[in-house]
Amino acid sequence: MEESTTHLFTKYLAGNCSDIEVRLLLEHFKLADKELLLKQLIIDALKAPEFSQVNVPDLDHRLEAIHKNINLHLQNDQIKRMNWWVGWRSMVAAASIILMLGAGFYFYNQYVHPYSVDGLTAENDIPAGGNKAILVLANGKRLALDDRGNGKLAEQTGVSVTKTKDGKVIYTMLPEVHGKDIGSRPEFNTLSTPRGGTYQLKLSDGTTVFLNSGSSVKFPASFANLKERRVELDGEAYFEIKHNEKQPFKVTSAGQVVEDIGTVFNINSYADEPNVKTTLIEGSASVNATVLVPGQQAILTKGNLQLKNADLEEVLAWKEGNFLFRGEKIESVMRKIAYWYDVEIVYAGQKPMADFRGKVSRSRKISAVLEILELTGSVHFKVEGRKVTVMN
């Protein structure tokens, strides 16, 4: 293999290629035997010192899955030339990182898919989730927010409730009640997102809550005259707390109490997850009286609390609109897909044992995510309606 080409590919594996260098590298794939070139490039590049410790098991088997997807790509005459090259760029990157990570894989948002997943077509593809939620007021009235127009939704004791066009419910203290006694019995409201829905909530004290799909938060419409501000969470949410020393803010969820001390944090407390994870982003907070510092994560498992350093990018990926997997098993990956696309997940045969790694936008349809996962060659899917069958 030409030395300059191998050097360029080695830079690409290390993530150091410029856009111009990427285009130069891809020019080599105009040759007839693209499979042989890709295989030889990877073998030669992995001899570089920076990859000397990389284990590359079963090279032919792993490349077979890549070549299958490449051939499907080339056979789709509806894909424009530019998309072909974007697809090749992601294919080459995926192939290289698969080999670098052994049983893992990496994928890119730019991947262009030809509907290769069994049962999926352009007509029955499942769209990504969006701004969907139901607000239940203290009097029991249910408001489906995705069906409601923007503007005022309701008025409760001391507060006005409005909806904005960007998917947010805002509770505002009415000016005429400031400083007045409006009673100490709170009126509880509940905001719930379905599977495939997210929403933002601004509480009457100025605290902002970002609610992930399949989650709910119960809260007082007004915190006036209360000794503490306490809300209840089921699922996952990101909190930006408006700190008030005289009125502590507490979040109860799945056997734990999180108390803010001037805080931004994320709580993942889904019932089908094996543990509850609380990650402190800024400020200070305590979980069951154990104080965290920024960048720490508290993991509660069957009453046992442990602390570790958090991967903040992974924790906040959902809020930033992405899936981000860092060595996750297939069950964890598919739980996230199930919540976001509102699908049922079933397993046929032995579950894939690979550790999955990668990043893709949550704005993509389900076909994009499943097809990229299939690129590893370690998992396959069949889609029937809203049921996704996972096969080894």
Image: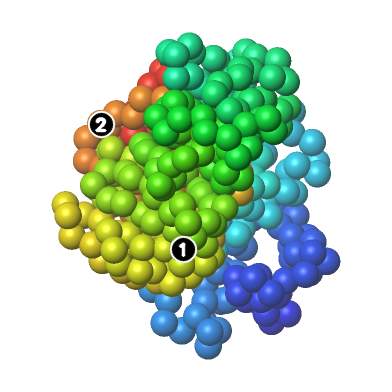
Give the residue type at disc 1.
Ile
Report the front residue among 147 and 321: 147
- Mark 1, other Cα within 10 Å: few <14 / some 14–19 / many ≥20: many
Locate the N terminus by quadrant.
Answer: bottom right
Q: Which residue is mark 2?
A: 348
Residue 243 against residue 217 in the figure, above or below: below
x, y percent for residue 7? 67, 79
**Label 2 vs 1, first from the N-terminus:** 1
Q: Secondary structure at mark 2?
A: strand
> Residue sitting at 79 percent across and 36 percent down?
80
> Residue sitting at 73 percent across and 48 percent down?
86
x, y percent for residue 263? 51, 60
Report the front residue among 27 and 87: 87
x, y percent for residue 127? 58, 25
Please identify the residue farthest to the bottom as the structure is shown: 49
Q: Which residue is mark 1?
A: 261
- In the rendered view, does 35 fall on the left or right side of 62? right
Residue 322 against residue 365 in the figure, above or below: below
Please identify the residue farthest to the front as the structure is shown: 180
The quadrant in which residue 6 appears is bottom right
